[in-house]
Structure formats: C-alpha cells, structure tokens
Image (cartoon, grey):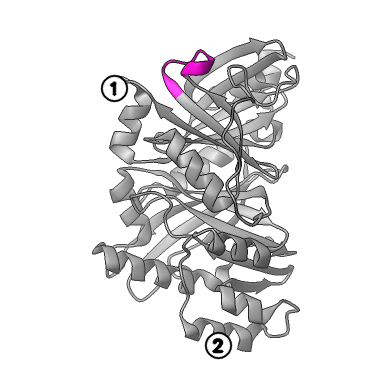
C-alpha cells in the first residue's frame, strides 16, 4: 500500500478496539494495590528495575477485556514525575489495537495530528510489537498498537512471574471498557470534535448542549464521537453558569484538559456494585427523591428495583432499551478522574435522564471541598 493510499484511509477505520489505558501515578505499587483490592483487578505483568527498566515501574492490571497499566517514574528527572507533579495521578495514554501501527500513524499525521512517537518496534522471544503515538487534548496521547506479530502476554520488557497475589474480596465482574470521557477548556469542544471527525475519522454519535446538561448552578456541553469498532469517547467543555461547574473544577485542579472518567461495563451491575461496596469503593449518592421519581417514571422496567435502590444504582430508559449506571467518587487525591460502572440493556446512550441527579451529587461534593 502506498503512502497516498494510507492517508486516504481514515485512522479510525483501522482501530479495532481498546488495547489499554495507562495511568501516570506517583506510586505504581500503591495504585496497583488499590485497583486490585478495591476494583477486583489482577496484576498480570510487571516491568521495572528487576526486568531491566531502571527508569519506571509499571504494573499491568486486567479484568475481563480491560487492561489498565499504572506507571511511575523512578528518578527526579523522569517526565512522569513532571507530569504527576503538575497534574496529579491521571489517565495519560488511551491505546488502541490497530491493523497496522505505521499506516494508522501516517494517516493521522497526514491529516494534521501531532506526533508523539514515530513508529517503533519492541521485540523479545515472543515476536515483535509495533507501536506509534499521537497527541490529543492536553497531554493525553493515543498509542496505536499492532499485535499481529507478537504472541507475548502484553509487551516486551514485562514479566508474568513474581507478581503480587490477588487480595481477598468478592469477584466484581467488570468485563470491558464502555467509553472514556475527556474534559477540554471552554470554547475548545468544537475544535476537538473536529479533530476526531476530520483528522481521526470518527463520527459524531450525540451532542448535548448547556440546556440539556444543567443544574441550578452549572452547565456543560458534550459531544460523543465513535467509530465502527465501538471505540466511544464523549468530550465535555464547561458552560457559563451561576457557579463553577464540575468540568471547570476538573480543569482547574488537573491544570488542563484530560480524562475525566472511564466507564467499565458489566453484565450484572447489582453483583458488581455489591462487591465494590464491600471492597470499600465509595460512590456518588443520589438523594431519596431521585428513586421516588425514577420508580414512578420507569417502574415498568423489569429490573431488580429493591436491590437497585438499596445499592444506589441509577436507571435510565431510551427508545432502544435501558441502562443501569453508578459513578465512583474521584479515585485520586485531586477531584479529577473517576470510574463509572455501567450495564446496558439495549440502550446506546449515556444516561441522559440521570444527568441532573448525577451533577447535583457532584455539586454536593464540590461544595464540601469548597470548590462550587
């Protein structure tokens, strides 16, 4: 295939799904311990000084088809240290499985993407992994991962022996990355939507304006982009309101754009939330009026209402089905990234009927922090 042929093929059409999400953190061992103990992940591989990497410590965590990588720098001159000092712990690399890393990268660059890493290879006895990366909002990047000629567990340089054991706790049952949400500065939403549409070749799935996503005090705008493989990424920007919105609080606290939350899918959200609560995970809580209202509106749905109310799970219905969801509190010291747990009963939306209740819960937490 010629370079011209490569650039006429949209990068998004080469994306086959999520490969992994990498977090830059201050203490990789502690973060890996938290994610295994609280969310039921298993550490399945490790890279660090013991494996020949004297600059970083990285733990691969897996559950279902979900891969998280938590990485910390080990020296003061590490760019990871610089990133964490500025932003705190956060999701820095949203990586995709592609059919050809070089072709995907060249197509993105030809269409105007910013290069982060030109195509390169990593090899070991299991074969060759091919990668390349481009920049997106803030310091977030997208890595293109070509695994066609690599049969190892994850990546050269990682070992699968001598790993920490699984902590005690009920299995959670998370099985996939449903979507990943990014926050961008006010006035920048359209620019980044255009990047994903025109440069990457995603299509716009939905758009919500400040009148659809608003409370008494704050508002935001949001656009959802997706590709044919189901890689879905909503993008948010703050809108003018009486007080500081949750998006603006994120931007101020994270000191720039970044990943706001990661939605993890499950086939049994009642079991998942029950297990997560037993493991000590804390969630944003809706008020009693929410459950009175939602049972009046959606009581016809065949869902376990008593368990849903007991566990605080949010419910929404659309023309194509329903969904159940719940959002954790921020999982870092700064009020930035959090996790959504979601079960889809045919619905392809994002819980629009729960927006007001969710944002009021977030505002109550903002008020406790003195940030509203």
Q: Quadrant of the C terminus?
A: bottom left
Whichever of callouts 1 and 2 sits on the residue coming sooner in the sequence is: 1
| Helix, strand or loop status at disc 2 | helix
Residue found 68% across the figure and 57% down from its top: 266
Q: Residues within 10 Å of mark 2 (few under 14, many from 20)?
A: few
Residue with the mark numbered 1: 76
Up/down of 240 relative to 4, above or below: below
Q: Which mark is residue 335?
A: none
Can the viewer see residue 10? no
Residue with the mark numbered 2: 292
| Helix, strand or loop status at disc 1 | loop
Q: Is residue 51 left or right of residue 26?
A: right
Up/down of 50 relative to 339, above or below: above
Camera-nearest label, 1 or 2: 1
- Whole-percent x, y for residue 89 in the image: 39, 41
- Whole-percent x, y for residue 247 in the image: 37, 56
- Whole-percent x, y for residue 278 in the image: 55, 63
Can the viewer see residue 323? yes
Location of residue 330 by image quarter? bottom left
Q: Is residue 81 left or right of residue 182?
A: left
Q: Is residue 205 left or right of residue 189?
A: right
Q: Residues within 10 Å of mark 1 (few under 14, many from 20)?
A: few
Q: What are the residue bounds of the magenta stretch?
A: 49-56
Residue found 49% across the figure and 57% down from its top: 222
Residue 52 belongs to magenta span: yes
Residue found 71% across the figure and 21% down from its top: 152
């Amino acid at each position: 295939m010629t370079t011209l042929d490569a650039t006429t093929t949209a990068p998004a059409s080469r994306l086959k799904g999520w490969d992994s999400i990498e977090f830059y953190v201050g203490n990789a061992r502690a973060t890996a311990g938290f994610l295994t103990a609280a969310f039921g992940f298993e550490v399945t591989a490790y890279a660090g000084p013991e494996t020949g990497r004297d600059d970083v410590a990285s733990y691969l965590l897996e559950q279902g088809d979900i891969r998280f990588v938590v990485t910390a720098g080990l020296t003061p001159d590490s760019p990871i240290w610089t990133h964490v000092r500025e932003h705190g712990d956060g999701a820095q690399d949203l990586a995709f499985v592609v059919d050809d890393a070089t072709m995907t990268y060249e197509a993105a660059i030809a269409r105007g993407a910013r290069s982060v890493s030109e195509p390169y290879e990593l090899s070991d006895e299991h074969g060759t992994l091919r990668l390349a990366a481009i920049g997106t909002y803030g310091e977030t990047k997208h890595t293109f991962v070509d695994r066609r000629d690599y049969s190892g567990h994850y990546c050269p340089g990682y070992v699968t022996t001598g790993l920490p054991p699984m902590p005690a706790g009920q299995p959670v049952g998370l099985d996939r990355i449903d979507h990943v949400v990014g926050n961008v500065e006010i006035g920048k939403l359209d620019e980044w939507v255009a990047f994903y549409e025109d440069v990457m070749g995603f299509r716009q799935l939905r758009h919500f304006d400040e009148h659809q996503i608003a409370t008494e005090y704050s508002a935001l705008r949001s656009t959802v982009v997706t590709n044919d493989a189901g890689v879905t990424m909503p993008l948010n920007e703050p809108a003018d309101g009486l007080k500081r919105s949750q998006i603006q609080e994120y931007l101020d606290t994270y000191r720039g754009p970044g990943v706001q939350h990661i939605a993890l899918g499950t086939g049994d959200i009642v079991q998942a939330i029950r297990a997560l609560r037993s493991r000590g995970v804390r969630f944003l809580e809706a008020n009693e009026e929410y459950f009175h209202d939602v049972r009046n509106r959606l009581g016809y749905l065949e869902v376990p209402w008593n368990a849903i109310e007991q566990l605080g799970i949010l419910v929404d219905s659309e023309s194509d089905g329903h969904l159940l969801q719940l959002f954790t509190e921020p999982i870092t010291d700064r009020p930035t990234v959090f996790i959504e747990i979601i079960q889809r009963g045919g619905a392809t939306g994002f819980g629009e009927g729960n927006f007001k209740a969710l944002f009021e819960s977030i505002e109550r937490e903002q008020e406790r922090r003195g940030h509203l």
